[in-house]
Image (tube, rainbow, N blue to C red):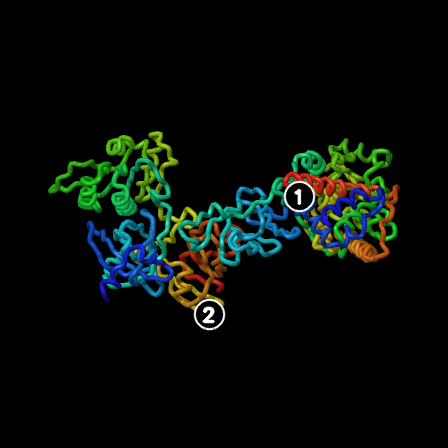
Amino acid sequence: MTVDLAYKHVDEMRPWSDRTHLLECVAWTPEAPDVMTFTFKADRPGHWFRYMPGQFITLELPVGPEPLLRTYTLSSTPSRPYTVAVTVKAQKNSIGTRWMFENLKPGMKIRAIGPLGDFSYVKHPGEKYLFISAGSGITPMMSMTRDMADRQPDSQISFIHCARSPDDIIFRWELEYLARHLPHFQPGFIVENVGRSQLWSGLRGFIDKAKIALLAPDFLDRTVFCCGPDPFMATVRESLAGAGFDMGRYHEETFQPVAPVAPVVVHEGEEGAPAHKVRFAMAGKEATCEPGFTVLQTARAAGVRIGAACESGLCGTCRVMLLSGEVDMNHNGGILDDEIEEGYILACCSRPKTDIEVEV
Amino acid sequence: MDIRNTVLRQLKNQREGFSLEQPFYIDPDYYRLDLEMIWYRDWLFLGHDCEIPKAGNYFTVQIGDYPVVVVRGRDKLIRAFHNTCRHRGHRVCTQDKGASAKLVCPYHQWTYDLDGSLVFARQMGEDFDKSQFGMKPVHCETVGGYIFICLANEAPDFAPVRATVEPYMAPHRLSEAKVAHKNTIIEKGNWKLVWENNRECYHCAGNHPELCRTYPEAPTATGVQGAADDPFISEHWERCEGAGLPSSFNMHQSGQFRVARMPLIQDAESYTMSGQRAVKRPLSDDVTISHIGTMLLFHYPTTWNHMLGDHAISFRVLPISAEETAVTTTWLVHKDAVEGVDYDLEELTHVWNMTNDQDRSIVEENAFGIRSPAYEPGPYSPDHEGGVMQFVEWYRNFMINRLQGDQAKLAVVA
């Protein structure tokens, strides 16, 4: 391939599309203990990634017979559009993320859906920003900060990040680097524990109103973006509301499917949780449903077709009759109480609690 | 010449006390004008709130070119929407009635919440703004257990209807009733012929042996004049009003709707062959006396009604074409009344099923005759057909006003 063909300007390239392209892993980078950044390019040359900083992508991980869907916010910035990256933390019981750590290597191609989402300063612009994150909740903040550093380096950003220890601060060195280059970028860290051999001059403990006021004294004037575990975000919300903050300027990222069309989340099973049998009566087939899998995923793995559209318990297209057994259904209003009483379930958001039989 | 001017001229030159000219009953262009001037502008009765008691219950109706869905929301409120998907226009709800957690278009599964807002549309791109593509609302009001909608952009004020009819309907507690039976017949005649036939009992003696066992043929009961001077009727009103049942004849000045409580013949209490109650369980606990007759409610152009002590019957008129009309009859009983125990369905529905079929036959024969080139408008009976004259007068007035109003608008544009 000549340089001529290999080198294309952005305006000569076409956007990557989740419907026709795959992602190809190009790098994995350790960021902190149990935290890794995976970087991807388009699986075919001449494509760029079109998205908003702060958006998420859903990766289809070929863990078992039926792929596992995992949603991550992108840590990369659209201002560097040739690759995308997710920065993921492996929790103790995780299946998908653990699989990525052990299997996802440069050259491997996977399917993805997205990027999607409204959690972006582009959608909720303000004059000044306050980013508050904990753990891997830093990823959308990093994406937005990198984007603003490239596009509008005079943006006013206060950046509060909470971590377990100084070593657990993801992107610490890049944030310090940015602080030296951007005139109005103020990072501040809060850590729970400091090891005896470490030097730490920052704040310790947990987030609260006083620490927010200390790290961002003018927080009342800022537009807030918050991402982290639910209890963390609840504390931030209460702190801000208690200080008289205008919550109309508060935005948070959550992966629980409470909002319509939130990303599909596959609940990871408890370690050692039993697999259940799913019998498809009309198809005359039986399949094993691994812990955390839905009836719909199990049906697909078994080659049983159930019509589905939203796959988030909203549209009700995947309604099926449960003939026996029990499921844990976490729907989004896509089924009536009467229908549930009659024995219907939505396959996309029902996970077997026992062996079950469904009428499809 | 413009059809509107032709119709306006014909209506203005209409001979007083005579039936309408032939094209009003058979011409597709006249029918289209009826849709535009009347059906797309007025409040229309569609059904009962007890037909959709739970969140997610819905029914669908076709009015001229407009498919409409009426649905009860999670907040218990009843709403109506244009039943056409904001994506490619497919009908969202394709069944006559049903129950659904969301309104989901079968074509591409665009998913609307019960309040009409679009909550899911698969892969429409990041710039797609769902808030701009909710189902379009249709004006919707409920009164006394009845659901009315209006397709106009700006609906006429519903307050006068409510003020007039609600006190008369309230004691019957139809919101708490249930549908014992419902059927729809197609009458091969123009919707105005269906109404004209309904608006007089001049034809009853020769055609309705079952109904005439209980329903008085007196024009004072069916028509619009003389009721107060009829001692039998005024005595009935006095007795009912004494028991807390508003009864006297009350018609809105526009002539479009009215209520009155009319006595049945002698000891009759219900529309049965015996005249005795068809339902043991009274329709409403708020009605404390027997022999209350029938509360007649009319609202042009869609509904006439009978509310009795043991049950209620509603009639819904919807045009299908210039020469076809659908008439839906609904029998309502107390929600706790049990079929086979408190009532026999055949006994409950017999009289009006017979009467409806007789009326269908009359309307169809009437339409046959009107198609004759020899047809010319004939005189109504001043004694018996005052109700028909009142209906035609209402039709003329509304059509003339609106055709002239449209002309005024056009003149401004020109």
Q: Is A354 left or right of B320, judged from the image as shown?
A: left
**Residue B207, image x and y in percent?**
85, 53
Looking at this view, is A17 or B212 the one in front? A17
> Quadrant location of the N terminus of chain A?
bottom left
**What label does residue B360 carry, if any?**
none
> What residue is rendered at 28% in x and 49% in y?
A79
Q: Residue furthest front?
A: B414
Q: Identify the residue under disc 2.
A: A284
The mark total stands at: 2
Q: Nearer the viewer, mark 2 or mark 1?
A: 1
Q: Is residue B354 visible to the viewer in this orientation of the structure?
A: no
Which secondary structure, mark 1?
A: loop
**Mark 2 belongs to which subunit?**
A
Label 2 and label 1: CA atoms lie apart by 55 Å
**Residue B12, image x and y in percent?**
79, 42
**Mark 1 belongs to which subunit?**
B
Q: Identify the residue under disc 1.
A: B41
Amino acid type shown at disc 1? Arg
Which secondary structure, mark 2?
A: loop
Disc 2 with disc 1 on a shared chain: no
**Residue B383, image x and y in percent?**
88, 41
Quadrant in the picture for residue B141:
top right
- Vertical arrangement, residue B138 with respect to residue A267, above or below: above
